[in-house]
Image: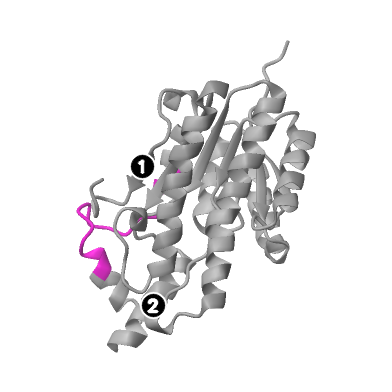
């Protein structure tokens, strides 16, 4: 019997860290379901095309992680495309940069819907599928350096990432009996659109030119450079592989040595 090609879902995969993760898992030989919001269809298509051109296997899909039915439909489509589910990377998330005193309560609701409920929906839909299949499985979520020590002007964002850390630990406890591991990655300062926004907002507050706030924050990186999506993707590759079978409930920092857990 031919060996089953492992199937991985990656949410928020149309750009940034999610794109890097999708490309790396495809290189690792997994069939990757490249999932993102409907408005990111062009990005989904280009990531799928890049993976296919490099000799990998990928299928595009749309999802709104804040909507439980949408996540369940994503898992069903992954199983349809690849035969079963083996890995779920709950990468989708949003950032908001604002002082707590100026923060809108509607923004608070939005960020918790995506970054916490979205991760919860993803974790649970994946676990239910693994249990229904009678297989083990790997679940990996997106935390952040701010899950250990918040940044000013990223208050609610930081709170969502602390919540991801807690959910990851609780899920690891409950699902270990099913041979499901649940871990998270904690990126630091990454050269993505999200950090461009942070740089812009902090720069406006402090009267800095474009790039200066980012450069100031980057001084805290021991390894001397801002990270790129592939730095995170390499960790996720490990967490998605059998090499990490004895690791669960962990949020692992990949930040160049800014913060120690």
Q: In the image, what residue occupies the spot 33% across and 76% down?
A: 211
Quarter residue 204 falls in = bottom left
Residue 7 drawn above or below residue 206? above
Residue 28 screen position, x and y as percent: 54, 32
Residue 67 drawn above or below residue 126? below
Residue at the right extreme? 80
Q: What is the span of residues highlighted in magenta in the rendered image?
A: 217-233
Residue 11 screen position, x and y as percent: 61, 50
Q: Nearer the viewer, mark 1 or mark 2?
A: 2
Q: In the image, what residue occupies the spot 38% across and 82% down?
A: 101
| Image quadrant occupied by the C terminus | top left
Quarter residue 246 falls in = top left
Residue bearing mark 1: 252
Residue bearing mark 2: 100
Give whichever of 31, 11 is nearer the camera. Answer: 11
Residue 138 screen position, x and y as percent: 54, 32
Q: CA distance from mark 1 to mark 2?
A: 27 Å
Q: Secondary structure at mark 1?
A: strand
Q: Secondary structure at mark 2?
A: helix
Residue 69 screen position, x and y as percent: 75, 51
Tell me which label, 1 or 2, sits earlier in the chain: 2
Residue at the bottom extreme? 207
| Image quadrant occupied by the N terminus | top right
Q: In the image, what residue occupies the spot 41% across and 78% down?
A: 98
Residue 208 drawn above or below residue 57? below
């Amino acid at each position: 019997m031919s060996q089953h090609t492992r199937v991985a879902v990656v949410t928020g995969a149309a750009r940034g860290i999610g794109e890097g993760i999708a490309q790396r898992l495809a290189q690792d030989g997994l069939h990757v379901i490249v999932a993102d919001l409907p408005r990111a269809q062009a990005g989904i298509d280009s990531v799928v095309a890049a993976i296919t051109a490099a000799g990998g296997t990928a299928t595009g899909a749309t999802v709104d992680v804040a909507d439980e039915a949408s996540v369940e439909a994503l898992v069903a489509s992954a199983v349809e495309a690849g035969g079963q589910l083996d890995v779920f990377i709950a990468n989708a998330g949003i950032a908001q940069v604002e002082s707590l005193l100026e923060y809108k309560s509607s923004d608070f609701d939005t960020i918790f819907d995506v970054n916490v409920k979205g991760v919860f929906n993803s974790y649970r839909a994946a676990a239910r599928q693994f249990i229904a299949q009678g297989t083990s499985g790997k679940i990996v979520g997106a935390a952040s350096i701010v899950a250990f020590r918040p940044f000013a002007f990223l208050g609610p964002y930081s709170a969502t990432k602390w919540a991801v850390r807690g959910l990851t630990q609780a899920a690891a406890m409950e699902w270990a009996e099913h041979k499901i591991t649940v871990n998270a990655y904690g990126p630091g300062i990454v050269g993505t659109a999200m950090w461009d926004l942070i740089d812009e907002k902090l720069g406006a507050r402090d009267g800095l030119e474009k790039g200066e706030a980012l450069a100031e924050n980057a001084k805290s990186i021991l390894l001397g450079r801002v990270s790129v999506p592939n730095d995170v993707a390499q960790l996720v590759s490990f967490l998605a592989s059998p090499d990490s079978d004895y690791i669960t409930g962990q949020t692992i920092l990949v930040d160049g040595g800014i913060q120690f857990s």
